[in-house]
Amino acid sequence: MVIDQVDVVGIAASDRAGLGENVWDIFRPASETGEVIDRIAKGSRPPRWHGRRIGEARTARTGGDLLTHDEKTFRRRKVTNGISAHAIANQRHLFDIPDEVAYLNCAYMGPLMHSVVEAGDRGVREKARPWGISPDDFFAPGERAREQFARIIGGDAEGVALVPSASYGLSCAARNIDVAPGARLVVLAEQFPSIFYTWREVAKTRGASLVTVARPEDDDWTRATLDAIDERTASVALPHCHWTDGGYLDLVRIGARCREVGAVLVLDLTQSAGALRFDAGAVRPDYVVCAGYKWLLGPYSLGFLWVAPEHRDGRPIEFNWIARAGSEDFAHLIDYRDDYQPGARRFDVGERSNFILVPMLNAALEQILTWGVGAIEVTLARRTADIAVRAARLGLSSAPAALRAGHFLGLRFPNGELPAGLLPALAGERVHVSVRGASMRVTPHLYNTGEDVDRLFAALERVLD
Ligand SMILES: Cc1ncc(COP(=O)(O)O)c(C=O)c1O
């Protein structure tokens, strides 16, 4: 608890400071006695996260229980992917969010930054005067989007296809997986419908059975999922965190188990990519899909499919002109060809060169890469830890921090019952969250301030009164 209070102070201090620069240091032991303070590292390089020193600091403060769950999780992830953890000061100035709006609903839809809106405006204007649109404009922006998304997930740009939705990417994966009759397809209980329906269809058409991992009472989705995978499993389709409440899955362990039993691993990172570190090199999935309009802060109707090298010769679900080799040469498109553009480009949706959406998504990805996914994750984890502690005082619970994704908080009401009229009451006070299943999702981003959180709790207290 002491540690969480430090989090609260740190976040609020950064908001109050309204810093021009975007990096500040937290949890630095100030002295050998282990005092923990928040320091603003103005203009300095992002500090490295030194788990050992943090551990020492906790010993002094807590007298034994070294780290909060969050910090244990960060430390473990740092060890696996070597990304430093620092936090980012408030970025609301980059967004079009009025002061009186507490938008804590990125899981529903990410807002667009000014830079993204401007890119879209430019795209609309260019389409108004199409004589300025060159053949190269059909290709270069899309290539940039592939590269940027690849950096976000630790994959390669060659493996990235541009798709309109997560479900489109899932259909590409479903079409190309080998499923023998009687095989098992593993999904999670209460998983996002696009996954559930796609995999139920695969099960029906190929004579396989859908195995649903029940919601674990202890919130340990990793263990529950590992228990469900065996030699009969043909595919496992998972998120990095559950879309209802942020329940976390250790995809490195699950990926290793899938390889052991020869199961295809299909991931939907729509609720995590851009805000939760992911390393395709460590997880080694077969397919990754991601809609772009949530944590990637992009427009609606454009997302990504990443395909592992061994599946890049698969069969697309549509047969459009631009996916074919030589499509850059518009004069010779009538010379039909059987071969495709290299990499995973064969899976691109028709009209994937969208002159409005692609530049918008590129602008959003550029900013995310500038912030750094690790820094976003750490900053949002501090924020959700603060919210979880304050919610607990009102009797609302959440998954333990080590078992949920840092950026994503699902709050549970006593007896699992949501108060009647909860969402309209909060929206009436311009506080925006969402409900999925029994969970109230509170999903902040870098535009949220301490005041937003105060307003959430002021509104919640009135509802619960
Ligand atoms: C986990 C998850 N996947 C995918 C989507 C979107 O799916 P689609 O792009 O198929 O509409 C959502 C939207 O809420 C989601 O939460």
Image (cartoon, grey):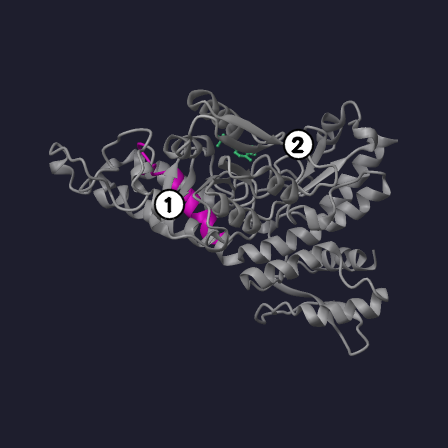
> Which residue bears the numbered disc 1?
160
Disc number lying in front (1 or 2):
2
User: What is the secondary structure assignment of the residue under circle 1?
Assistant: strand
Residue 359 on the magenta span = yes
* Of the pair 43 and 318, the residue shown nearer to us: 318
| Residue 247 visible here | no
Question: For the C terminus, which image quadrant?
Answer: top right
Most common SS among magenta residues: helix
Residue 319 appears left or right of 284: left
Residue 393 in sight from this viewpoint: yes
Q: Is residue 443 magenta?
A: no
Residue neighbourhood size for the residue with mark 2, other residues' Cα within 10 Å, grouped as few (<14), some (14–19), many (≥20): some
What residue is shown at x 52% (from left), y 45% (from top)?
113
Q: Which stretch is magenta?
A: 350-367
Indicate the secondary structure of the residue bearing disc 2.
loop
Residue in view at x 61 percent, y 45 percent:
249
Q: Is residue 140 left or right of residue 465?
A: left
Q: Amino acid at mark 2?
A: Ala
**Image-quadrant location for residue 16:** bottom right
| Quadrant showing the N terminus | bottom right
Q: Earlier in the sequence, mark 1 or mark 2?
A: 1
For label 2, the residue is 214
Residue 162: image location, x then y, percent: 37, 39
Q: Which mark is residue 303?
A: none
- Label 1, label 2: how far apart the Cα atoms are: 32 Å
